[in-house]
Amino acid sequence: MFAILALLAISCGEKEKSVAIQPIAVKTITIGEHANSLNTKNTGFTGKIIASKTVNLSFQIGGTIEVINAEMGDFVQKGELLAQVDVTAYREQYEARKAQADLAKENYERINEVYQKGSIAEIKMIEARSKYNQAKAAANAAFQNVKHSKLYAPFSGYIGAKIMESGDLASPGRPVFQLLNIDTVKAAIPVPDAEVNQLKKGDSAKVKIDALGDDFFFGKVAEISIQSNQQNPVYIAQILLENPEKSIKPGMSCTALIDFNQNQKSDDSEIILPIEVVSVTEENEYFVFVAENGKAKRKQVSTGKLYSNGIAITSGLKASDQVITSGYHKLTDNTPIKIAQ
């Protein structure tokens, strides 16, 4: 019995030692000292990279695919043959129509020669000419089917997807390949309805792509949707980026930092915080961490306008509050902290 109590006492002692939490090093700024210029970073939005041009390639005629010349990820040149369907039936149809056109042509030329000599009525020449024109048009239409049996790349780019294989039955409009142009790419970012009217075409932006390290790519806003998502009041803006090295791939996640119109200035009395300092709960309530008596305290706040240097805090903070601006992502309410100099 005494041995069991001793073991329990030892284990309890070890638990007490294990719960000791090392203070988290943080940086702060005091409200009232630099209230409206806490950060010069632009506003950040999270999105993904898309190709500047995406085209689904399909045949204009139906048939069994005989040839597939490209695989997913391949780079293809404009005009390169990508696929071909069985052309046997279309070629035979064309040959038959061409033979009919040749016969109609010979008949028309013979009748026209007789007509020129005045030995036949004009109506006979007109009928022969009409039949020849009809036969020639039918032959040309049949030849277009032969031409459309081959699928060519309309521009140089990468095969983003190969949807059909050799032996599959192609039909008009059914995609065979997806072709992407990534000489330039776009960062597609969702912008809330409260901020979308502050965004303008041509606004400068810099984009950080998670997969490519800490480097920034610079571009400009090229497109802004005028209709929000059906489920959420969110608009899509697209930032055009040059991609000469082809290192930026569609689908990569990114963070876009937008330089909003600099003519919009914040009032000197407003509290402006960096947008990344302000967090949001699942209930869409905003909060920040402040330093109080050696601990991080979570404070609920209300937000206002978005500016080029941050977001306005309309309530929840007061002068002399020390807002934590670094290390906040490691914090929970009442976490011990130490303020770094």
Image (cartoon, helix red, strand yellow):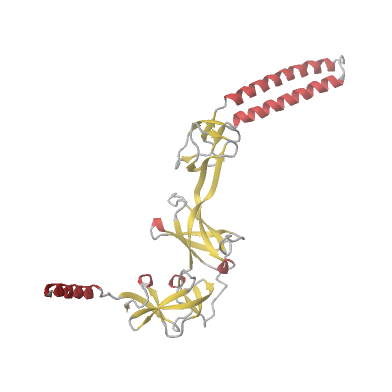
Above or below, 294 against 53 in this view is: below
Quadrant in which the N terminus appears: bottom left
Q: Where is residue 117 in the image (x, y as percent from the top left)?
A: 85, 15
Residue 86 appears anywhere in the view: yes
Please state which of residues 291 and 103 is positioned toward the viewer in this rendering: 291
Q: Quadrant of residue 112?
A: top right
Residue sitting farthest toward the bottom: 319
- Left or right, 135 with reference to 9: right
Above or below, 61 against 298 in this view is: above
Residue for point 48% across, 34% down: 69
Residue 154 appears anywhere in the view: no
Above or below, 79 against 292 in this view is: above
Q: Position of residue 81 (x, y in %)?
A: 52, 34
Q: Quadrant of residue 22?
A: bottom left
Q: Position of residue 284 (x, y in %)?
A: 49, 70
Quadrant in which the C terminus appears: bottom left
How many numbered tags mark residues here? 0
Above or below, 273 against 108 in this view is: below
Please state which of residues 284 and 154 is positioned toward the viewer in this rendering: 284
Please state which of residues 275 and 212 is positioned toward the viewer in this rendering: 275
Residue for point 50% across, 40% down: 163
Residue for point 44% across, 49% down: 246
Q: Position of residue 101 (x, y in %)?
A: 71, 21
